[in-house]
Amino acid sequence: MTFSSLLLIEWKIAPRAMLRETAGRFILLLALGSFLLCLLLSGGMNRLLSGQWTVTAILRASVPAAEGEGIAGKAVGLPGVRSAAYKDPEAAWKEFLAAYPGLESLRGAGGNPLPGHVEIRMRPDRFTEADIRAVEAALRPLPHVEKILYGGEALAGLLRIREWVNAFFWAGFALLCGVTFLIFVLQEKARCLSLAADFEFLRERGVPARSLSISRASAAVLTGFILAIAATGASALLLFLLESRLPLLGRVIGPATEILTPSVLIPLAMFLFSAAIASGAASSLQWSAVQSPRK
């Protein structure tokens, strides 16, 4: 028999069982791919927190709007800053009343008591205390900036909690990977045992056990790679479809277009190859385990 015919030998011997097993593996890889994609895009808690937490540069009284816009432009150019928006005193007052209705009397005859300010939001991957302090250090010396508000000790505590939560998410992903590999191993073992008579028949007809082992492992690697591509592609397509219907999903996980960035594509490529290698390793391990009593 040729290598190409051996590569698909199990599909020829037990097509229905292989189809059921392949469908199960696709579902497992779909869950893993979706989990990984969400982790890579969101950075765990990073995107949610960076979208809610702001660094605020309070400007001095009577700072012209042009100067405020200039400070916002300078902030946008700083490393780690995703966006910066200047709010003039009138906009600041409206936001204050929206947050604390019924306090219109504070304005009184003295005019607007609130100064203008610049709201700065950090990139999810640069939402760290060091990057936020770098923004503070860059803006504090400016003559039109009165003070910088960024949270201080509260931010430090929040970032510590964020690290624990992110570690929990990645530990969960690693656990799912381990469970998936274990399922692959059990599937391979069950298949080896159920097809033992067929493999013995092939060996009696002159097909070396080594050739069977290599062909099974190669088929597992190829199938694992194809299934990982299909599952990851389905995960990405699902995210694209849901993003427009669930705006909250985009704010928590991130825009689907970022899938095409190197920071996401490279780990996804590693996932594809890892799934293929895990499939091949499960095949080789169980073939050796089942065949060892025969030696």
Image: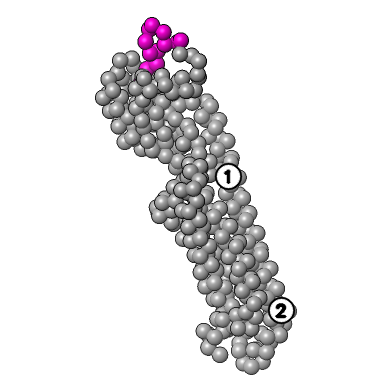
Q: Residue furthest right?
A: 293
* x 57%, y 49%: residue: 170
- Residue nearest the observer in this picture, 206 or 64: 64
Question: Dot 2: within a 10 Å radius of its alpha carbon, few (fewer than 14), some, or many (20 or more) residues?
Answer: few
Q: Which mark is residue 211?
A: none
* x 49%, y 26%: residue: 151
Q: Quadrant of the N terminus?
A: bottom right
Instruction: Name the amino acid, label 2.
Output: Ser
Magenta range: 105-116
Identify whether 99 is placed above or below 131.
above
- Residue nearest the observer in this picture, 262 or 114: 114
Residue 264 seen from this side: no
Q: Nearer the viewer, mark 2 or mark 1?
A: 2
Q: Quadrant of the C terminus?
A: bottom right
In the shown orientation, is residue 285 left or right of residue 82?
right
Identify whether 148 is placed above or below 166.
above
Q: Give the total of numbered labels.
A: 2
Q: Residue furthest top?
A: 109
**Quadrant of residue 168 within the rendered picture:** top right
Q: Residue furthest left?
A: 66
Q: Which residue is mark 1?
A: 167
Q: Which mark is residue 194?
A: 2
Give the image location of residue 185, x and y in percent. Answer: 66, 68
Identify whether 7 is placed above or below 86.
below
**Tag 2, which secondary structure?**
helix
Q: How is the image coloured?
A: one colour
